[in-house]
Amino acid sequence: MKMIALVFLGMIAGTSLAGQRAATIAAFTAEQAAAGQSEYQANCASCHRPDLAGSGEAPPLAGSNFMSTWGGRATSELISYMQSAMPPSNPGGLGAKAYVDLAAFILEVNGARSGALPLKATSPFLIQGIATGKVQIPAPAETAAPAETPAASIRQQITAGRGLTVTGQVKNYVPVTDAMLRNPDPGDWLMIRRNYQAWSYSPLAQINAGNVKNLRLAWEWAMNDGGGANEPTPIVHNGIIFLANTGNVVQAIDGRTGDLIWENRIGPDQSGSIGAMRSLALYQDKVFMATTDARLLALDARTGKIVWQTDIADPKKGYTNTSGPIVIRGKIVQGLSGCDQYKKDGCFISAYDPDSGKRLWKFETVARENEPGGDTWGKLPDLLRAGGDTWITGSYDPELNLTYWGVAQAKPWMRATRGSGSGKALYTSSTLALAPDTGKLAWYYQHVGGETLDLDEVFERVLVDLDGQKLVFTIGKPGILWKLDRTNGKYLGRKETIFQNIFDQFDEKTGEPRYRADILEQQTGQWVQACPSTEGGHNWQAMSYNPGTSQLIIPLSQSCLEMKGRVVEPKEGSGGTAADRRFFEMPGSNGNIGKLAAYDVKTLKENWSIQQRAPFLTAVLSTAGGVAFVGDLDRNFHAVDVKTGRELWRTRLGTAVQGFPVSFSIDGKQYIAVTTGMGGGSPRQVPLTIAPEIHHPLSGNALYVFALPEEK
């Protein structure tokens, strides 16, 4: 079996194992470090973050664990490794000089000092002899920041937004009401996944299985390259598209012509951020936006002017937003990300007043000491209870008046590193049902207790009524499709959609899985093999419920890995992901990473599937016309028959097709919209490692809108 290594450099910012001694050898020049900083910002920061703190699949490059891994090795080894493996999409593609400069910058961040002696690719310096691991972030030349800037204050170095750069007005804007959100107009797409039930389904049928082959590009809108990952949902109301562009930019665009009406560059332009603004929300006369620096803003939907803004959490502590809010009964409900490092505060879901931005309630997703569920973290103090991110927007049942959210895994990922023992670490890897008026917990169901392999259960919760039952379906990284009673959280069934070998047994009454013995007995420093990998059998790319066929159509991925946990210091600012990984093809997949499959909601039977080398990187959009749309890493946008999976149409776009496709109508004409984009974490990085022959341009963020040709 073909094995590809992808062991990322470095780990957590903090105190190095080499101690706090001063670096004595000047192994590189200031010019090299400055050039390396520019290379880092352009080619590395989108994954490893501007402050080298790491994110998701890209661990930090500064601090104690970097020194633990690399301190006893030579600078030449560091340079050679980067040149052979980075960036994952183009190893060695930066040129020999760039890798030397990058090493100089990383060394400088880790406390090494510059001098007159230039660093060379063959330089034999022992890293722990020239670097202390005491993190210092050099300020960019154009700022007046001090030479040594704490990693936590990196936000001060980020370019601020420029406000309204294009002024205009949405004419005849109709305020969005609660009734519209409960029962949206067929031609609108008012929220992520279109309706409260998270169906990702359009009731429009003008484009159908018979004529979809005639689809043509109506217009294209180029989006900002850089600025983080591009994975948006175009929000559409009365023919106007409200678009979350990268770099915390919001735009209003005429859906018929592609003309820009207004633009607000709110900022910060976090060109190195891996986070994505996956959606906006509309309510009354406002557009609501959650920024990547953990703020919530309300904009005037007609003009784009900021009405109010409020801080959700402190970005200096690593907090961020990656998916937008949902409006429920006059409250703006928002999740939170960036909870991987140890800190006194934890992750939470919160609600805000739409007129003022005042916080109305919050629910903490990690059980605290001396609180219900607190003992499931073992003897860990609150400071060392990390994780519990809610980085995918929830769904809502108006009849039950409950909102459903997935909670991500506990962190550090591996139990041996985390120190939580065999405890279930509530409320991680769970479905939560909350009362939206108060934030009070109605019930929870934990899919995986004490998760240990970075296999989230955080994704969409799809609500379906069937034979008098109120159901909620979800699928996480293990690739298990879960079926629950959404009135009380009772387990009703499951389906393994891809090959998995992490669980060897399930309780048939409760659905509770049991890990393989060697996973439970893991120790730091030892490799553990698992299928699927941290790419996930399913990731943020949402499934679609097609009511005409009673099917869930799900984008899936097939890859495996070996993972090795590391020791982390039990102190604030430490924690994180703390693991090395190497990836390989999933057995039985014939090298096909991408899978698209349809499952009957009553029986969970797989009705059909499509497999291909390239992974699918968009949510699935299905329609009343009997068509499902999905895009992939290899630049293809596909239309398939919802009944059979047979491909009906495809077109090749400028770069990887990524985001949430939508459908809308203007004056009776149906349109299909989809974005292309960069960034996106493990669903891109893992396939680029095990399928390096798939190439795409490293730019090309754009919105494409398709329609049938006019009848003559």
Image: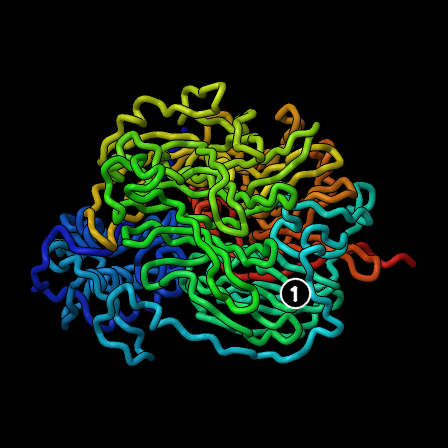
Q: How many marks?
A: 1
Picture quadrant of residue 616? top right
The residue under the point 15% across, 51% down is 71
With 539 as the anchor, is 566 left or right in this view?
left
Question: Percent position (x, y) of residue 594?
Answer: 55, 38
Question: Percent position (x, y) of residue 182?
Answer: 69, 51
The residue under the point 65% across, 65% down is 284
The residue nearer to you, when weighing 488 against 513, is 488
The disc labelled 1 sits on which kind of residue?
Answer: Gln
The residue nearer to you, when weighing 499 against 664, is 664
Question: Percent position (x, y) of residue 477?
Answer: 47, 37
The residue under the point 51% across, 64% down is 246
Q: Is residue 647 above or below residue 467?
A: below
What colour scheme has been applied to the protein in the rendered image?
Answer: rainbow
Is there any visible trace of residue 333 in the rendered image? Answer: yes
Picture quadrant of residue 286? bottom right
Picture quadrant of residue 518? top left
Q: Quadrant of the N terminus?
A: top left
Q: Is residue 448 above or below residue 126?
A: above
Q: Is residue 305 above or below residue 218?
A: below
Tell me the element at label 1: loop
With 616 as the anchor, is 408 left or right in this view?
left
Q: Quadrant of the C terminus?
A: bottom right
Residue under pointer 1: 284
